[in-house]
Structures are given as structure tokens and as C-alpha cells.
Image: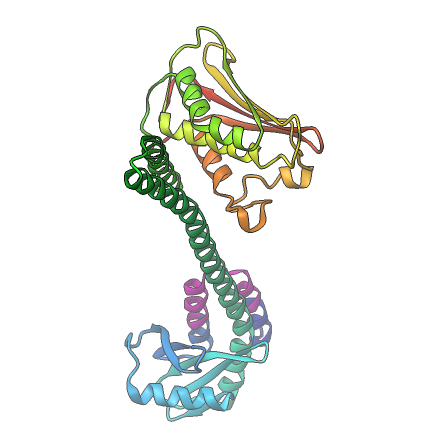
Amino acid sequence: MEPEKAIHEIGRIYDAITDKSVLIGFFLQTVIQFIPSQKAYLFLAGPDKRLWLEEAILGPKEASPQLLQSVQQAFDKGKPSVQKGMLFLPMIARNMSIGVACFERDGDFTPKELEMGFDFVSEFSGALKNILLFEENIRMERLAAIGQTMAMLVHEIKNILQLAKFSDEMIRMGIHEKNEKFLTRGIEKLGKTLKDMDGFIGEITSLSKDYQLEPEVVSIPALIEELKNDLSERAEAVSVKLEFSTEEDFPEVQGDSRALYRAILNLVKNAFEAFKNKPDACIKVFARLVDSERYEVSVQDNGAGMPDEVKVRLFETFFSTKGKRGTGLGLMVVSRTVNMHRGTVAVESQPGVGTKFTLTLPRIFKKTE
């Protein structure tokens, strides 16, 4: 096969490679096959146009000051060149210089080899630029995710701190005025604040890679009663009717009680957000047995409901319909908890009618592998 056709075919292989290290190594090896060289180097450029040695074949892994100076000069000129047994091939893609490929041998390189090297680097540069752009996009997405996570943490911590400050003020007022009612109320609020903080830490921890459930025997009726006690004051404050119920003789199940509590709590909290001055606002939490192996916990509201385009995105990372008031954390916790219990989440919703979440969970906990 003629060199021109061979280089074109090799260029198609370059385009198919998605790993940067593999692509660079393959490029240097293929050039050496067509342009015999004793050493091969590839330098990449940073935002400040300074070069660093990314890969070397048959040569030292650190570039000497003399080599780096010569490569930098070739990069600044932006044109292929030869000098005293060195072949310099600047890499340009989309009108942007991204680095230099350098080849070294005892004898000089010919004009024909210079032309062939230019053809190789032209095919290679576009493929490398695509990978570099992809890696940069990944880095930016990670930075954005970190920023979003920090904003979410600050948002939640601020809410908890506000409760803590309110509790502190009530306790101080109770002590100062010797008012037992204020003192008792402040202590109760402080206890709730500590529970909220513990729950928030549990939620963040549950999203970590190494998080493990702590299975135990769980009484679902007792868990439902705990939710009722914790949420009754909030429901009364916003005029929302809460209905909690379980089937009679509901058997004990296995699972992580705190994780299950947080999952159901998040669904009820979301339901509170579904109402906008609705006079007959109601949230129903109901637990029942499905069969001998499974049980269900459903959270249903008669709020605003949601369209299909929102419903399909509910469990996306950080997705929220609440704007700056929402973090998207709640349903992430629900999804992770249910998945780790090897259960499922079903969502039914109709705009103007309401929404129902149903968690279907195994009665016997089986550890995920």
C-alpha cells in the first residue's frame, strides 16, 4: 500500500481510539514504522503555551533542558522542521496548537520524511484534540458537580442552623425569665434539630461509594408512628392533614431502620411542597403486605401533581423543581436506599390530581454483592 493511503487508513484508526495514552502510544509507534527513529517524544501544551513531556518511546522519561528548548521553539514557529537528527512536528487542530511530536536518530531526516511526518501528525492531531476536549468536559462537569454539592450542603446546613438558633433563643429566654414553658419548648426544639442534623449526615453518608446499610429487625408500624410524631407540628403549621396507617398484625421486617425512615421522610417532605394554599391538602402514608416476601409503603398527596417530562427526571442527580429552594438530595436518598434494600420505587402522578410514591421492599434483607 502506498504511504499516503496507509497514513489515511491509520488516521481512521486514530479517530476510533478513545483513550489518550493508547492513542499517543499508537501514533508514536506507527510513525517510527514509516520514519525510522531511535527515540520518540510527544509534548503537550498547557494554557500558558508551556510544554511538558507527555510520552516518550525508547527515550528518557524526562526531557533535557536542551530538548525542551528546541521543542518549544518548534512549537512557537508552528511549522514542521528538521535539525541535526531531530524531526519536529507541531500538532495543530481547529486552528489551535496543542503540542509537538519529536523524533530523533543518528542520521538526518529527509524532506520526504518531513512531508510524511506532517501527514501523520495532521491525521493524529484532530483525534487527540477530540479526546482532550472530552477530558476537559469531564473535568468541568466534575467541578460543576462539586460546586452544586457544596451549594446543597450549605443550603441544608443553614436550615438546620436556623432551627438551632431558634432553640437557643427559647432556652435562653426560658432561663432568663424563669419560664418553664419556654425552656421545655426550647429543649424539645433542640432535640429535633440534633435529630435533623443526624439525619442530614446520614443522607450525605448514604450517597458515598463505601456506604453500607446496617440491617436489623424493623417494626414498620413503630417507624410510621415516629414519622407521625415528627411531622405533626409541621403539618399543623401549614394546614395539611396527615394520615398514617398500617395493616393490622403487620409483621417485623429486616432492613436499615434509619435509612428507611429517611427515605419515607423525604417523600413526605416532598409532598408538603406539592400544595399551594390548597384548602383540603392531605398526605397519606400507608404500609401493607404485598405477599409473604414483600411489603409496600406508599406516600400519596392530592397536590399539584407533575407532568410526564418531570416524572421521568425525578431520580436524576440533583434534579429539583424547586429552584434555589431545592437540592435534589431527597429523591437521590430515596432511590439509593431502596436500591440497596433490593426494592423498587414506583411513581404515579397526574397534574391537578396528585402524586403517589410506592416503595416495594423485601421483608428479608439480602445484602447486595
User: Residue placed farthest to the right in the image?
Assistant: 352
**Residue 175 in sight from this viewpoint:** yes
Residue closer to the observer: 277 or 87: 277
Q: Residue at x 43, y 19 (%)?
A: 225
User: Residue placed farthest to the front in the image?
Assistant: 177
| 352 over 33 or under it: above or below | above
What x and y, as percent, mark residue 273?
58, 37
The image quarter containing residue 256 is top left
Residue closer to the observer: 122 or 191: 191
In the displayed structure image, the side of residue 307 where residue 174 appears, left or right: left
What x and y, as percent, mark residue 204?
38, 42
Magenta region's main secondary structure? helix
What x and y, as percent, mark residue 53?
35, 76
Q: Residue at x 39, y 17 (%)?
A: 222
Which quadrant does the C terminus fall into? top left
Q: Residue at x 66, y 36 (%)?
A: 306
Magenta-tinted stretch: 11-29
Q: Residue at x 62, y 38 (%)?
A: 312
